[in-house]
Image (spheres, rainbow, N blue to C red):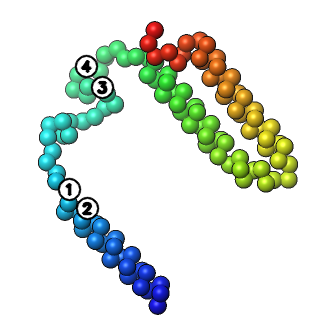
Amino acid sequence: MNLLIMSTITMIISTLLMIISFWLPQTLPDAEKLSPYECGFDPLGSARLPFSIRFFLVAILFLLFDLEIALLLPTPWAINFLHPTTTFMWTSMIILLLTTGLIYEWLQGGLDWAE
């Protein structure tokens, strides 16, 4: 009986929120909202305009550190293995490698946005 009541309440709340979200917003689109958005580039202009390569370098650097988080995410579960020192060694090597790369990039001036 308790499960039936909870399911009914959940369905009522979900239906009520869907109805409210359908009728509540006022959709009055203007020219700015209807224009296509292309990450800061004018989509209607020439496709041969020069762009800053530093923007793409910073984006690649962000992706590398995002990958680092994905590699280090299972570390707390891996500590429970039979040999936690092996897990600690591999984790330390990943962090050391990425820190060394970041320091090299910093010293080469790759992180300076303006010259």
Label number found at residue 41 = 3
Residues at marks 1 and 2, CA–CA distance in whole angstroms: 7 Å
Q: Residue at x 30, y 72 (%)?
A: 15
Where does label 2 land, which residue?
21
Residue 46 left/right relative to 115: left
Residues at marks 2 and 3, CA–CA distance in whole angstroms: 32 Å
Residue 57 left/right relative to 40: right
Q: Residue at x 24, y 36 (%)?
A: 36
Which one is closest to the eye, mark 4 or mark 1?
1
Where does label 1 land, which residue?
25
Q: Secondary structure at mark 1?
A: loop
How packed mark 3 is, by other alpha carbons closer than 10 Å (few <14, some 14-19, many 20 or more), is few
Residues at marks 3 and 4, CA–CA distance in whole angstroms: 10 Å
The kind of residue tagged 4 is: Ser
Label number found at residue 46 = 4
> Where residue 68 sits: x, y (%)?
62, 36
